[in-house]
Structure formats: structure tokens, C-alpha cells
Amino acid sequence: MKRVDLVRKLRREAAVTPAALDRGKAVLMAAIRQEVQPMRRPTIVPRLPYEDVGAALSFLERAFGFREVSAARGVRADGAIDHTMVEFGDGMIGLGAQGAHGAFSPKRAGTATQYITVHVDDIDAHHQRAVASGAEIVSRLHDHLRDYRVYEALDLEGHRWRFLQWLREVPQSERH
Amino acid sequence: MSSPPDAEVIGRSLDDPEAFGVIYDRHAAALLRFLGRRVGAGVGEGLVGELFRIAFEQRKTFDVSRASALPWLYGIGSNLLLNHRRGEARRLRASARMAAAHDAADKRAGAAALDARLLFPRVADAIEALPDEERSALLLFAWEDLSYQSVAEALELPIGTVRSRLNRARAHLRELLEPDGKRRVRSR
């Protein structure tokens, strides 16, 4: 028997699982994103803990129009998103697995302990989108004096968000 | 419409990095199998993403006169595997045990099968003992069925060098398998 044929006989098939292919692709795509968009680093970045970061991300994108900073995405061995960041206008917020830094999702803690104010350009359209996406409205859309229009909503794990649009520039003397 | 060749996709990815994802979709399964054969599925799975990350970062160096990126990717994979010699040796010995058991069980193989238990571990040791550059060339040729031309592209060597390297690998195997084989070494 020829030597190369002997070598050939030691060839073994290796299984290819779709999950393994997906994990490999996630590594590549992270490298690609790194090149496409070098990450912005605002001075202060609040981070919100979630039980299911992946579900939270898609909800925040769908309901509130946030956009993932995909270069920030960290994926666990099982393919689930461990942490990532979203941006909206010039603001940025981190999403992370609860418990990792001693903070817990309101879903587990039973209460929200903070709320985040987000300025939007078209509050009515924003409100409509949030409602259509199933966000729980906890403070209805209304005008506050004649200064701004505002509503508050809970996301799918109970974090509280306050969206508002200024209606006019309020002079210093009139500010409360 | 036929899909654009790899060279075109990689060319496009210089300005549009995300286009490189297509290269992954086309070739990742083949490379994953290649890595799995060499170091086992578990380690191979950990390496395939790394392999394509390196390819992405080195995509400017891809020779666009080559239509397929596959040999180039095999070359990157072969380099990566050099850091996994121990895992590869383990895998090879396990393959030898399996091949030997398989051949010994094959009644039709007759008397030759009796030698299988002895022969395959020696083949494994012989492959393991080859210099890195000969082992890389030999396994791309024998296990991945790459042509001389593709092996040359993978290892960035002239085709003549690939030929002589494969000949040397064969000669080495012969020496390692037959203590008296040295006398019979000849070039093909």
C-alpha cells in the first residue's frame, strides 16, 4: 500500500454543527464591526441589568428606537448575548446580565430603583411606536405646563423610562 | 445570476467590510471540518472564528488573481494549527487506534489486517514526526484533497517546492515505517 494511502486512512470525519458555525461567525462579525465603527465612549454610561439581555435588546430597538452599538456586544459560549450597548442620539446605555455587577433586573428585584430620561424629537410618534410594541405605559402622554410633552413606560423587565420632548425653549427666569 | 467569485467579494470587502461575511458563509463548514480532523471537533470549533478573524484582518494580502479563497483559508488554518501540536498528536493517535480496530475487524482484509494494529500507530507516529512544513503539505494533500496548485497557494510556496516537500514527506514516512527503507528512497 502506498504511504499516502496509509496516511489517508487516518483521516477522520469531524462533525459540523450549525451552532459551532454560528459561534464562529459571531467572532468574525465582532471583528468586522470593530473596524466599521470604532466605539464612542461618553463620560458617563449607565448600565442596566437584565435577566435576558438579548430579549431586552430587541425590545429596546423595536419599542424605543434604540440602536445597538454592535462592537460592544459580548456573547457567551452558548451564543446568548451577555452584554452590549445601545445608543440613541448622543446618549449611550449599557445592557448587562443581572447579578454580574451586583445589580438586578426589576423583574427579579420587584421594583425599579431609577428611571432614565430620554429626549426625543417627535414624542407622539415615539409614544405610538412604544405602545404598538407592547411597552407598558405607566404615565400617559401629556403636556407638562406648556414646556414639554412627556410619557413614561416600563420595558419588558420593568425598567422605567421617561420620554419627553421640549415644546419651547424655557427662559432661565421661568425654570422650576 | 451566478454569485461573484471570492476574489471579487474580498475586493469589495476592502471598502465594505461586512461583505466578508459571505466568505464565511461559503467556506466555514469546510474549514471547520479541516480543523476538526486535525485537532478534534471541540478545539476546532474554538478556532474557526479565530481563523476567519485573522483572514478578515489580512484580507488586503489576498491575491485577487486567485478565484477561490479556500486555499488561502487553509493556509491560515495550517498556521493556526502549529500552536496546537499536542492536541493534534493526541487526535492522530486516537485515529490510529480507530483505524487499526476497523481494519482488524475487516475479515476480508485477511492477513494484512493482522498488521493493522501495529501499522497504524506507526503511521500516526511517523506523521507526527514529520517536520511542520512537510506535515502541513501532506495533510492538505491527503486529507483535504487539495491539488498541488492549491497546496502551493495555501502555503504560499512555488508549486515545485510543494512537489519536493510532498516527496520528502513520503520519503520520510517510508524511512520511519521501514527501518531498512532508507536504501530504497527514491524520488518520483
Image: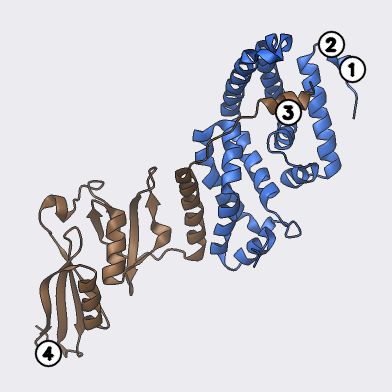
Chain colours: A brown, B blue
Q: Give the CA distance from mark 1 to mark 3.
A: 21 Å
Residue A66 drawn above or below residue A101 = below
Q: Distance between the residues labelled 4 and 3?
A: 81 Å
Q: Do the residues labelled 2 and 1 touch (CB within 8 Å)?
A: yes
Tell me the quadrant of the picture where the C terminus of chain A can be found: bottom left
Residue drawn at x 77%, y 42% is: B147
The N terminus of chain A sits in image quarter:
top right
Of discs 2 and 4, which sits in the foreground? 2
Q: Where is residue B167 in the image (x, y as percent from the top left)?
A: 83, 30
Q: Label 2 to label 1, Cα distance in Å? A: 8 Å
Q: Which residue is drawn at 10% across and 53% down?
A: A110
Residue for badge 2 = B180
Q: Is residue A151 above or below residue B52?
A: below
- Amino acid on which disc 4 is placed: Arg
Inter-mark Cα distance, 2 to 3? 21 Å
User: For this view, does B156 lie left or right of residue B18?
Assistant: right
Residue at mark 2: chain = B
Circle 4 chain: A
Residue at x 68%, y 9% (from the top left corner)? B114
Which mark is in front, 1 or 3? Answer: 1
Mark 3 Cα shell of 10 Å, populated few (<14), some (14-19), many (≥20)? few
Residue A64 at least partly seen: yes
Q: Residue A146 shows which numbered tag?
A: 4
Local SS, label 2: loop
The quadrant in which residue B22 appears is: bottom right
Instruction: Kindly identify the amino acid type of the residue bearing the numbered disc 3.
Output: Pro
Have a look at marks 1 and 3 and say if they share a chain: yes
Q: Which circle's residue, 1 or 3, is located before the other in the chain?
A: 3
- Residue wearing tag 3: B131
How far across and how far down the image is residue A26, in percent?
46, 52
